[in-house]
Image (cartoon, rainbow, N blue to C red):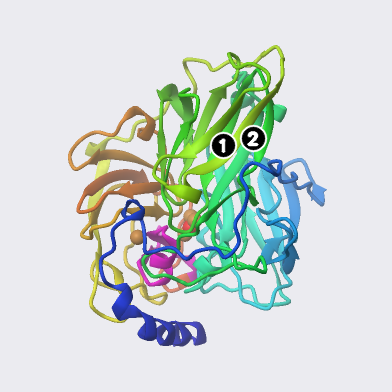
Amino acid sequence: MSATRRQFLKTLGAAAPALLLPKTGLAGMGGPGNSSTISVPLFQQPLKIPPVLQPVSSTAWQDVYELTQVSTSVEIIPGTQTPILGYNGMTPGPVLRVDSDRQTVVRHHNNTDVQTTTHLHGGHMQAGDDGHPIDYVNPGATREYVYSNRQLPATLWYHDHPMDVTGEHVYAGLAGFYLVSDDYERSLGLPAGDQEIAIVIQDRTFAADGSLVYSDNILGELGDTILVNGTPYPYLEVSTQKYRLRILNGSNARTYTLALSNGASFVQIGSDGGLLPAPVTRSTLTIAAAERVDVVVDFGNASVGQQITLRNTAGSGSTAEIMRFDVATVQDDPSVVPQVLRPIERLDPASAVQTRRWVFGMSGGPMPWVINGSPYDPYRIDAMPRLGTTEIWELSNRTGMMHPVHLHDVMWQIIDVNGRPPAAYDAGWKDTFQIPPMATVRVIGRFDDYAGDPNDVTSAYMMHCHILEHEDHAMMAQFVVVA
Ligand code: C2O
Ligand code: CU
Ligand code: CU
């Protein structure tokens, strides 16, 4: 038993009984939140756009990047310093912009005093580079992760993924965008340049001195202050154009329902795994932890001086507001949203060689969250799908709260939710699925490209609930793709 596991059992033993009581409120998405002892005014700070990381070297087919994980302090609440863990000292970390089929090497230096392991969420790579929870990068060590980017363009993100403490480390700041594109996507004429913005929404709780309050709530950590790209309730000056917003819910547990205060709609063009076949107009977007929505918002009919807020209609009080768009200038808009985006190869359920059932439940034991009755064991392989084959996975929720279930390795398609086919916006490639209370979601995927060794646990891919405290409290399993 590892030191972290022992420590985890000790912590949980003290906290479990009271926390296991069912909770309502907060849309049923987690436990009671902590309260910040500092209050943050709305829309006072500009939205930060994290810098795009430049490669330290490049060849005809590969780019090498370097990131340093550090513990530092940054100003999040004006006039205070917040200790964080950050890639290159910032949260979110720098943005990596890469192209499909061009190899990326990311050299991570761990200058923190904790063990880390970096996972590229939505990435398709050898399991050995997938950031297995016990494949640690020790303090002071350096580790290279190799990503082939043999996948469709999509909004991915990298984040820390160590055994038992992923929630704490991501909360402390270890997350950043990894955007995959290609010539085809660039040829579509979608909003680009300053009109293409990646935003990560996260909820945090702050103490009076500006430090983060993290309670490792096993129902899911909820903060009462909403950060966008690391800034509480920012504003963004926009022009009268269309904007492409790549939205990531990077919160540990909270689910948001996004809406615009002027009643305008979002045109959704993509989801976790990339572009949809055709745009879908939606007035609200419900986005669970780790999901991504790629939307176009058109400010073309707005007038200068107008202020439009992005709201969370699933929240109340300080969690009901997210950010504000201030229309500042008039500009012609050369961008378009084509009616055909990227055709999708439909996976045929008849081609599946196997159906596996995964039941997300609770146990009465010290590790409350289980899959198929068992807490995660890093030395147990839970499934061995065959390379190149297609499988149907039935994800069943036997609890009273929604679990956003994430599958590593490849992208999947939803077949049905309680027997009903998904809405058009959920019918693209995805890696994270909202499994409503007591519901079953069937998904289909094909295990392409990479096989591992069943005798080497670090060649396993994870599947888990992405409420990070459920993951850390053992609602995780792993599979090795075998040749
Ligand atoms: Cu976003 Cu296994 O993680
Ligand atoms: Cu992942
Ligand atoms: Cu969960």
Q: Position of residue 412 (x, y in %)?
A: 38, 43
Tag 1 residue: 246
Cβ atoms at labels 1 and 2 below 8 Å apart:
yes
Q: Position of residue 383 (x, y in %)?
A: 32, 63
Q: Residues within 10 Å of mark 2 (few under 14, many from 20)?
A: some
Q: Toward which corner of the image does residue 107 lie, by quadrant?
A: bottom right
Say which mark, if any, is on residue 33.
none
Q: Earlier in the sequence, mark 1 or mark 2?
A: 2
Q: Element under label 2? A: strand
Tag 2 residue: 197
Q: Toward which corner of the image does residue 46 lie, by quadrant?
A: top right
Residue type marked 2 = Ile
Residue 50 visible in the current orientation:
yes
Left-right relation of 306 to 317? right
Q: Residue at x 60, y 61 (%)?
A: 38
Which residue sits furthest left? Answer: 419
* Quarter of the image where the C terminus is located: bottom left
Q: Element under label 1? A: strand
Residue type marked 1 = Arg
Classify mark 2 as within 8 Å of ligand 1 or not, answering yes or no. no
Q: Residues within 10 Å of mark 1 (few under 14, many from 20)?
A: many
Left-right relation of 114 to 20? right
Q: Nearer the viewer, residue 182 or 224?
A: 224
Q: Nearer the viewer, residue 380 or 466?
A: 466
Which residue sits furthest right? Answer: 56
Q: Nearer the viewer, residue 132 or 224?
A: 224
* Quarter of the image where the N terminus is located: bottom left
Image position of 272 with respect to 72: above or below:
above
Residue 69 visible in the current orientation:
no
Label 1 and label 2: CA atoms lie apart by 6 Å
Image: magenta residue range: 458-483
Q: Position of residue 137 (x, y in %)?
A: 63, 73
